[in-house]
Image (spheres, grey):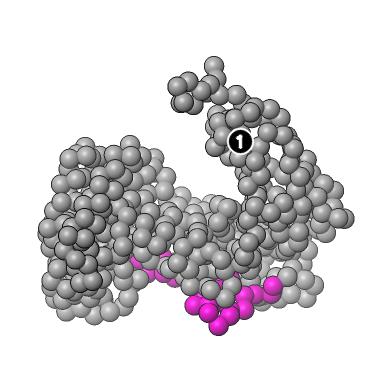
Amino acid sequence: MRSTHANYIRWMHISPQRADVSACDRAGIVEVCPAGDKEGDPVMDRRLQPEVAALQWQQRLEVMRDSIIFYRNTPSIFFWEAGNTVITPEHMRQMVALRKQWDPEGGRVMGTRGNSDDPANTALTPIAEYYGVMIGQDPRTDRLAGNTAMFRAYSAERRDKAPLIETEDFRDEAARRFWDDYSPPHFGFKPGPKDTYHWNSETFCLAAAARYHDYFINRISNPDPAHSKWSGYASIYWSDSNADGRQDSSEVCRVSGKVDAVRLPKEAYYLYRVMQSTAPDIHIIGHWTYPTNTVKTMYVAANNCQSVELFVNGKSHGVNSAPERGYIFAFPQIAFEPGVIKAVAMADGKALAQDEIQTAGEPKAIKLTPHKGPNGFQADGSDVVFFDVEVVDAQGRRCPTDEARVDFKLDGPAIWRGGYNSGIPHSVNNCYLLTEDGINRVSIRSTLKPGAITLTATREGLAPATVEVQSNPVAIQAGLIGMAR
């Protein structure tokens, strides 16, 4: 799930009564694929001359057509989105016709979003093949009287005509680098005057779990008509990205993602993994390397179990059988002791899943881990290798509160593309980068010349790291690139 301001591809949860769950499992991340738009229909923009509006709409149809043709063999896409907001019924007809012409056998549907009760709202017509809303689990939907009563284009009547999807839920933001209120070097997130949200990584998870639980208990499969609503849930962002964020005092990216801008998992990534698991799963939110005398609530996300027991260095700190909002098991007043913290998910007296975290020692070394594509690193001028950059202790454990500069040196036929530091302008493409929570990620791009490429990472006082990757030759014929045989 990623997006720009007017081009959203969303990560989704599909209710089993309105989708092929086995297909969801095969596809991985389920997505909504849109055409480009300007968050509206040009014919409804009074600032535009009719001929200009008609031209803009024609261009949008062409973008949607090309998007369908390009992505129709992508198994993750279940939905085509004709508009980020309201479009006219006639334009919705044209979009549905495109879907039928260019993706007649894909099993997908065409719809649009609408938050308006305006008569022109496509969400109020029977034309769309699904309806998208942006309600955010607003409790006012619970107070609607009768099938036709409506709030922001949601009504029981619309729900019963076609699948209803929450299309842009949990817009909140939190950067990966702020663990919680007890972790150096930041000791929590202090919002600035232009920041909308105040979450750290831990509280971001708690808020996300609450919102997801509100969706989950209101799925279409709920036998209670008052809570039988959603066929799908789309969280707005999969990765932090350069878009319309609302943390202007603190961030250079929108930080609503489940992974950060270089695709490193945030704690929310593991939370959503647990919440959407069909098998027992568990994750301790946070780390276990705190300053002396730290006492805090430890939170565990778990699913498909009856209770969770927490242990510190083998000693039980209680069993919790009453999760908050379905998934969060809280253990208050846990005193930090260096060693191992472990959580065990249980049912009927049996352990179903467990997670544990060890305390890290002092930073001793840098560790580099390359990530190449399935065909290796190709010398085609566009292939990329990512390198995880970690600071580890003497036993190779990541130091989760490390945040300091690492310098890089690249040798060989490749182009340095560098990395990114959350909240630091102009941090890209430099030959240095700060770790965040003990890790960051940098990248290199291939040239047309194959050969050995060496990356070295250094910081004073730490053992350096060097790793070598090989870029493989590719065949170029008539301007087309293919793998060398």
Q: Would you say 237 lies left or right of 363 here?
A: left
Q: Give the camera-side residue of 173 and 277.
A: 173
| Furthest-bottom residue in this view | 193
Q: Give the camera-side residue of 452 and 211.
A: 452
**Element carrying mark 1:** strand
Q: Position of residue 79 (x, y in %)?
A: 29, 50
Residue at the location (56% across, 34% down)? Answer: 381
Quarter of the rendering containing residue 369: top right
Sort mark 1 into few (<14), some (14-19) or many (20+) by Cα contacts within 10 Å: many
From the image, tell me which residue sits under label 1: 446
Q: Quadrant for the C terminus, please.
A: top right
Stretch in magenta: 186-215
Residue at the location (26% across, 53% down)? Answer: 60
Q: Position of residue 153 (x, y in %)?
A: 21, 70
Q: Position of residue 190 (x, y in %)?
A: 62, 79
- Residue type of the residue flagged with mark 1: Ser
Q: Give the camera-side residue of 53 and 351.
A: 53
User: Does 94 sit above or below residue 47?
Assistant: above
User: Is residue 440 covered in magenta?
Assistant: no
Q: Would you say 61 lies left or right of 462 here?
A: left
Q: Give the camera-side residue of 477 and 264.
A: 477
Quarter of the rendering containing residue 38: bottom left
Is residue 194 visible in the rendered structure shown here?
Answer: yes
